[in-house]
Image (cartoon, grey):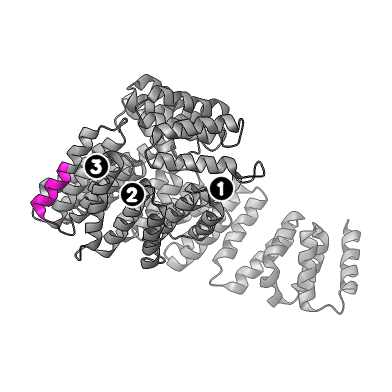
Amino acid sequence: MKYKIVNLFVFFTISIVGFSQTDYFKLGKEYYNNGDFEKAAATYSEVVKKEENLPKVYDTYLSTLYKLKNYPEAEKIIKKMIKMTAPDNYTYRIDYALFYKQQNLTEKAEKEFSSFISSIQKNSTAIDVSGSYLQKIGEYTWAKQLYLQARKNFDRYAYCFQLSTIYNRLGETDNMLDELLNYLNQHPEEIEPIQNVFQNELETDEQFSAFETKVYDRINKDPSQIIYNQLLLWLNIQRRNFSKAFTQAKAIDKRSHETGTQVMEVGNIALENKDYDAAAMCYQFIADTYKDSYAYTVARRMLIQTREEQIKNTFPVEKSKIVGLINDYNQLIKENGRTAYTLESLRNMALLHAFYLDKKDTAIVILQSLIENPYTENRLRGKAKIDLGDIYLLTGEPWESTLLYSQVEKDFKEDPLGHEAKLRNAKLYYYRGEFLLAQEQLDVLKLATTREISNDAIQMSVFITENSGLDSTTDALRDYSAIELLIFQRKYNEALVASNMLLMAYPHHELTDDVYWLQATILRQTGKPTEALEMLKKISTGYADDLLGDDALFTSAQIYEFDLKDNAKAMQLYQDFLVKYTNSVYVVEARKRYRILRGDKI
């Protein structure tokens, strides 16, 4: 073997005559990458004869020597680098400790590393460089040892963020959470990036609950630290536990004198997520607490709007309750006058008249007065124009609709409101079966800055694409879009008849499950939950793995819980849903509903 190595060195000494220095580096790297470690070692041994070349090939040369178990040469180049880079030779001294570890000489490795960290424990620069290097090479246990030792010489909160990362890598979740909370205690301005870390690392209910307990413990020990309340507020919003979020927002409001700002925000998020009870609590608190502020009128309006959403989502919708809502809005305007904070109520009233009481003329008069009112704020005027366009669509005047939508598009270019108007135009083309024109609008909206509008545009575009030309025509899709228009116009009986005709005309068509979904929607809204469940079951059994599979099962559970008041059956379906659709957007809500029905305190 010794003869072979000598000859190999002679061969390389002869063969690389005339090579440039760069050629040596490339050749050595090429041999290394190809697994020719002996040739790589021979090449690098020639390269490092010039001492200044050693830093340039050190990492690869050391790895090569370890592959060949040539420990004497490895030790030689590590010591040379330590000498060459002194006193800032921290990474190479770590490499020397790792040199023993490479040979499974654990005791020597630990002794060498302990000696190293003892010599730098008061040198913050050395600790930063060494800690980063240890994390880079995956030596997390040593990195932990380094930072904990160094912490003794600084303060108890030193290196919290670094240690949290290390504990995470080591699977020590409890310690990771403690370190992040320690870091946040010292750097409250960093709450958003810390929340992002929590969001990425906390996955299960158990982890969230353990984290919540930790934060409550911190509040009990240090009630003056408001940052923990802010963290709990964020946590409960993430978990969609808006009642608890309200409690934290209220505590923050009381100490920060914010006149209900965060409570209002929680109420708005709760309303958006259909937690009407929590939303009402938030708005009622503001209305009771800040009677002399601008927030009072807003909260009163939002209280009525919360009841409105609850009534509109309780099927079938009772007209007497709609009339009651309109009276409440009128009373609000009467008490507070037509101000910037009450004019929004006119929009709500108009839409209730048009879509639930079939009083389209009344709705048109209200919206036109709002649009023409010189005191109406521009965005509210734009929203009213979109609403008026929707009502003209109800009355079968699509040209009036598109004219209004286009006005808003023009007035609010590159603005979410303008994008919303463009989406309405796209839907109008879609309803009329003009799919190419609809796609032109949707292609622009796919790049919209608002995620919700962008997602709606993408979803609608994909739907049109997938269902166009399946039978060399768009007849089935044209019939389907016409049914959707009938539903928008609240012509439910006509829509049911048309949907049954579509199913007969195109049996086993790709649109079949979508038609079942439309029928289920109509039946539920018209107070026929049992029949709606039959349609949803057809999707759950025959199209479970398709796009509407999770929607169908989740909605079935909702019908049993809210419409039929059968909590046992609802629990069973929520549980089935959580097992079957682990990646669905409804998972968080399904888990929450299941826990509430089970009687958990959340």
Would you identify the image quadrant in which residue 3 lies?
A: bottom right
Point out the frontmost of discs 3 and 1.
1
14 versus 186 height, above or below: below
Q: Amino acid at mark 1?
A: Ile
Disc number placed over residue 306 in the picture, else none = 3
Residue 80: x %, y % from top left: 66, 69
Mark 2 or 1, nearer chain start:
2
Disc 3/disc 2 C-alpha distance (Å):
22 Å
Q: Residues within 10 Å of mark 3 (few under 14, many from 20)?
A: many
Q: Examine the residues drawn in magenta and state their main secondary structure.
A: helix
Q: Residue at x 59, y 52 (%)?
A: 109
For the record, the magenta segment spans: 327-339
Image position of 18 (left or right of 152): right
Closer-to-camera residue (74/248): 248
Residue 160: x %, y % from top left: 39, 55
Image position of 70 (left or right of 166): right
290 versus 471 height, above or below: below
Q: Which residue is mark 2?
A: 391
Disc number placed over residue 464 in the picture, else none = 1
Residue 6: x %, y % from top left: 88, 64
Point out the frontmost of discs 2 and 1.
2
Q: Is residue 549 visible?
A: no
Residue 15: x %, y % from top left: 90, 72
Closer-to-camera residue (260/154): 260
Marks 3 & 2, CB-CB < 8 Å contact:
no
Q: Amino acid at mark 3?
A: Thr
Q: Residues within 10 Å of mark 2 (few under 14, many from 20)?
A: many
Q: Is residue 512 visible?
A: yes
Marks 2 & 1, CB-CB < 8 Å contact:
no
333 magenta-colored: yes
